[in-house]
Image: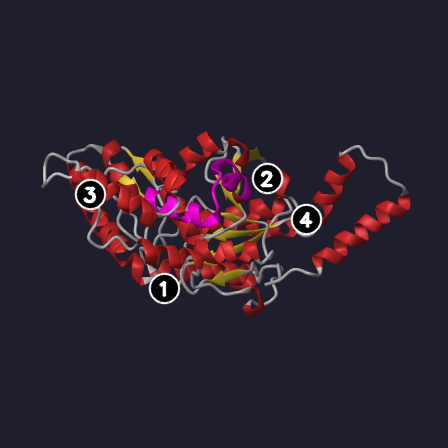
Amino acid sequence: MGIHKLMSLIDEKAPDAVKEITLDTLTGKKVAIDASMCIYQFLISTQTLKQGFGVTELRDKDGNLTGHLVGILNRTLSLLDHGIKPIWVFDGKAPQLKAGELEERKEKKKEAKEKMDQLMEEGKDDEAAKMAQRSIRVTPEMTEDAKKMLRLCNIPMVEAPSEAEAQCAQMVKDELAFATVTEDMDALTFGTTVLLRGFGNRKDPIRQITLSKVLEGFEMSMDEFIDLCILCGCDYTSSISGIGPVKAFKYITQYKTIEEVLEVLEKENTKSKSATKKRYQIPEEFLYKESRAFFNEPDVTKKEDLEEFKWGTPEEEALTKFLTEEKGFSEVTVNNALKKFKKTKGKANQKRLDTFFKMGTKKSTSKVTKTKAAVKSKGKKSFK
């Protein structure tokens, strides 16, 4: 979905739904992370521009990109260090509804790559760097490398049957995780109760968006919200030319459903002086019903079919061999990561207790003991 379109509406119409937080706020919680979205972010962030050499990227001996492995490893360690338990969720098979969107993206990446090569030949490195970001393509091999690394780190992950953000949302609804971590606003449309955005920029705070407060601020039901999101633009159908977020909000607020809105738009078009140039260009295949159905009932794995989540210690020898011999990591980098893994052990419990005492609430010894017992007991109920 158009990230800025929906986010701008939320900021304007439901500001109470957004809260700026720090990582310490999430101590003791589990989060479901949209791995596919993060992989793109990490690959972009590890691109560097060297004057006279163009854009360079982290690669292994076979030429495969490895920036995403660096990013996933560092993000995992950062979360664990703050007492947060990550669950990485990977995309499965894309729904047929998304075929057109994926083909369009593929074509745009191809055009960006051609433009990048041209700009590099002309010595316009800064412009080439921008095109390089747009041309990044994640291969199945790169995704498998990420999964293998997480398995060797003994960090839980889920392979979604379809869309990762839909799977994350389901896990949050099933109370297997506190929130979905992604930049993709579709996670809200899929029903995640809490969305966390902004992990990619250390300078800015993380933004926590609460779905119930969005609906309250918009004065909409979930069904109306889904229709609004489809009108704003989603990956599963073409958008209506002439309808932006402001008009989409106005129409859904007034008419409640896309069906009613379409009737109004058709009437507006009949008033147009030109028979060929209509005010609103409604696509011939406007698959809003199919998109609506997919948002309501996406292909996901439910709680009862997921194994128990466990956060273990890395398989040091196998992880070191994989990262150093196959992926080009230095031994120093891997050894430092392994040391950090050891330091994070038990951080969730310790940090939660630290926060408890910092609150300044006076508790008796017996109550503190009960708190420790409750924390320990809660740790045994996690799911994989």
Q: Which of the marked residues, 3 or 1, is nearer the chain's N terminus?
A: 1
Instruction: Find disc 2 in the rendering and name its residue.
Output: 23
Question: Contact, CB < 8 Å: mark 4 with mark 3?
Answer: no
In what quadrant of the picture does the N terminus appear? top left
Q: Which residue is mark 3?
A: 281
The residue range painted magenta reads 212-232
Q: CA distance from mark 4 to mark 2?
A: 12 Å
> Is label 3 or label 2 in front?
3
Examine the rendered structure and indicate whether residue 238 appears above or below residue 300: above
Which sits in the foreground, 365 or 147? 365
- Mark 3 or 2 closer to N-term? 2
As helix, strand or loop, the secondary structure at mark 2 comes to: helix
Q: CA distance from mark 3 to mark 2?
A: 44 Å
Q: Nearer the viewer, mark 4 or mark 3?
A: 3
Residue at 46% from the left image edge and 32% from the top image edge? 13
In the image shown, does 197 or 287 lie closer to the viewer?
287
Residue at (43%, 64%) from the top-left corner?
A: 299
Q: Which label belongs to residue 348?
A: 4
Instruction: Residue at 43%, 65% (x, y): give it.
Output: 161
Amino acid of disc 1: Lys
| 380 vs 334: above or below | below
The kind of residue tagged 2 is Leu
Q: What kind of secondary structure does the magenta stretch mostly adopt?
A: helix
Q: Determine whether the residue tagged by mark 4 lies in a helix, strand or loop.
A: helix
Name the N-terminal-most of marks 4 and 2. Answer: 2
Q: Residue 4 at what x, y percent from top left?
A: 37, 36
